[in-house]
Amino acid sequence: MTKLTWHNDGDDDEITRNLRAMYAAPVGEHYWNDLEARILARIGEVDLGWWAELDRWVRPALVAAAVLVLAASVAMFRARQVETRTAYETILTPSPVPVETVIRPTLEGDREASLRDVVGHKDRSNGRP
């Protein structure tokens, strides 16, 4: 049966040496140069980034952007036309309220009513309706 211990009894020295020798990094410079060449060759073969996907979408994205700019320009032009037409119609359409009441506020009260009657009788005395 195997004896389990938590401390180093000296029995593990040989196993430790063998494991260190087995997992030790190679000593020669040739190994590291060869490893670097293999890694760089593999990097050159593999498509590593999401930006490679963007390369395929450049042309469709530019077309979509041009269409959006064109659509926005047309919408702005139409909105400006409607706004201008509405402004002209507002200015040129006759008002349902007489201009006199729009320019001069309506006189109210007894005093103002008497004044209106006097002014109204004066116009009638001159022969005007």
Image: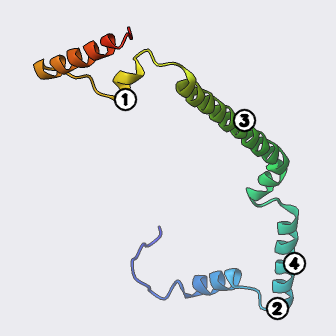
> Going 80% across and 56% down the picture, which residue do you hit?
52
- Sequence-first tag of 4 and 2: 2
Identified by mark 2, the residue type is: Gly
Q: Nearer the viewer, residue 73 or 25?
A: 73
Q: Secondary structure at mark 1?
A: helix
> Going 59% across and 82% down the picture, which residue do you hit?
15
Please state which of the two labelled residues, at mark 3 or mark 4, is closer to the viewer: 3
Whether the residues at callouts 2 and 1 have beta carbons within 8 Å, the answer is no
Q: Nearer the viewer, residue 112 or 4?
A: 112
Position of 104 with respect to 94 (left or right) is: left
> Going 69% across and 36% down the picture, which residue do you hit?
77
Q: Position of residue 80 (x, y in %)?
A: 64, 35
Q: Quadrant of the rendered structure where residue 9 is?
A: bottom left
Q: Secondary structure at mark 3?
A: helix
Image quadrant containing the C terminus: top left
The residues tagged by marks 3 and 2 sit, at their Cα atoms, a distance apart of: 71 Å
- Sequence-first tag of 3 and 2: 2
Q: Residues within 10 Å of mark 2 (few under 14, many from 20)?
A: few
- Sequence-first tag of 3 and 1: 3
Identified by mark 1, the residue type is: Ile
The residues tagged by marks 4 and 1 sit, at their Cα atoms, a distance apart of: 91 Å
Q: Residues within 10 Å of mark 1 (few under 14, many from 20)?
A: few
The residues tagged by marks 3 and 4 sit, at their Cα atoms, a distance apart of: 57 Å
Q: Secondary structure at mark 4?
A: helix
Q: Residues within 10 Å of mark 3 (few under 14, many from 20)?
A: few
Q: Secondary structure at mark 2?
A: loop
Q: Which numbered dot is residue 103?
A: 1
The residues tagged by marks 4 and 2 sit, at their Cα atoms, a distance apart of: 15 Å
Whether the residues at callouts 3 and 4 have beta carbons within 8 Å, the answer is no
